[in-house]
């Protein structure tokens, strides 16, 4: 008789465990999650940075451990000012703060820096190289996205990014 009671008790406990675990993993509304500094904590990703319409990706470089992602684009926009006119309102509307106002470079390009939630985005716009074959070349954009590193963390020397800003 004791064996039967033990089996029933084990069956009841097993059923209770299964029912208890069935409630785990429910979807939670992200808006109801805690807010940090007045802004709901969200992940800022490089994939969310917009590209101008009809742009072509020329090169992508993503270092998993270097904390720096880079993409080079060609755009049919007419000049560096048009590219900055595209990015400035979009980034500001997306919550990015201007860290460095777009400044003119010696080659006629523009460079601006924005930050958001520990991320840095550098928009470097270079005029296309005019040649006899291409008197109106496309404008080149280099986007550099730097991710936040935890305080005190250090990468191996060979993987340390020297700078996120291009040499001027």
Image (cartoon, grey):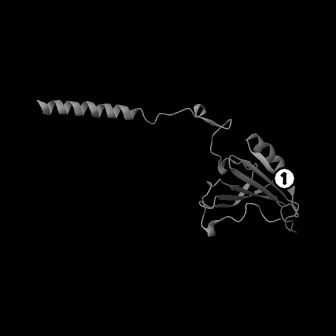
User: Does residue 85 appear to the left or right of 59 in the view shown?
Assistant: right
Of residues 30 and 160, the one drawn nearer to the viewer in this rendering: 160
Q: Is residue 78 visible?
A: no
Quarter-of-image position of residue 162:
bottom right
Q: Position of residue 95 (x, y in %)?
A: 73, 41
Helix, strand, or loop for circle 1?
strand
Write down the residue under mark 1.
Answer: 102
Q: Position of residue 114 (x, y in %)?
A: 76, 50
Residue at image position (88%, 61%) is 108
Q: Is residue 137 visible?
A: yes
User: Does residue 27 appear to the left or right of 65 in the view shown?
Assistant: left
Q: Position of residue 130 (x, y in %)?
A: 87, 65
Tally of numbered tags: 1
User: Does residue 16 appear to the left or right of 32 in the view shown?
Assistant: left
Q: Quadrant of the C terminus?
A: bottom right
Q: Is residue 77 above or below residue 22?
A: below
User: Does residue 18 appear to the left or right of 30 in the view shown?
Assistant: left
Residue at image position (68%, 38%) is 37
Q: Residue furthest left?
A: 1
Q: Residue furthest front?
A: 152
Residue at image position (79%, 57%) is 124
Q: Quadrant of the N terminus?
A: top left
Report crowding for label 1: few under 14, some 14 to 19, many 20 or more residues within 10 A (C-alpha). many
């Amino acid at each position: 008789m004791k064996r039967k009671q033990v089996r029933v008790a084990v069956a009841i406990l097993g059923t209770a465990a299964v029912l208890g675990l069935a409630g785990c993993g429910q979807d939670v509304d992200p808006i109801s999650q805690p807010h940090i500094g007045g802004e709901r904590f969200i992940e800022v990703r490089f994939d969310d940075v917009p590209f101008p319409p009809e742009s072509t990706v020329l090169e992508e470089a993503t270092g998993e451990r270097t904390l720096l992602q880079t993409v080079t684009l060609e755009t049919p926009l007419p000049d560096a000012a048009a590219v900055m006119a595209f990015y400035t309102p979009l980034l500001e509307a997306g919550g990015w703060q201007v860290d460095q106002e777009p400044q003119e470079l010696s080659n006629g390009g523009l460079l601006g820096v924005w930050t958001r939630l520990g991320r840095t985005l550098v928009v470097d716009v270079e005029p296309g190289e005019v040649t006899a074959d291409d008197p109106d070349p496309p404008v080149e954009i280099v986007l550099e996205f730097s991710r936040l590193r935890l305080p005190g963390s250090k990468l191996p020397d060979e993987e340390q990014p020297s700078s996120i800003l291009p040499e001027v």
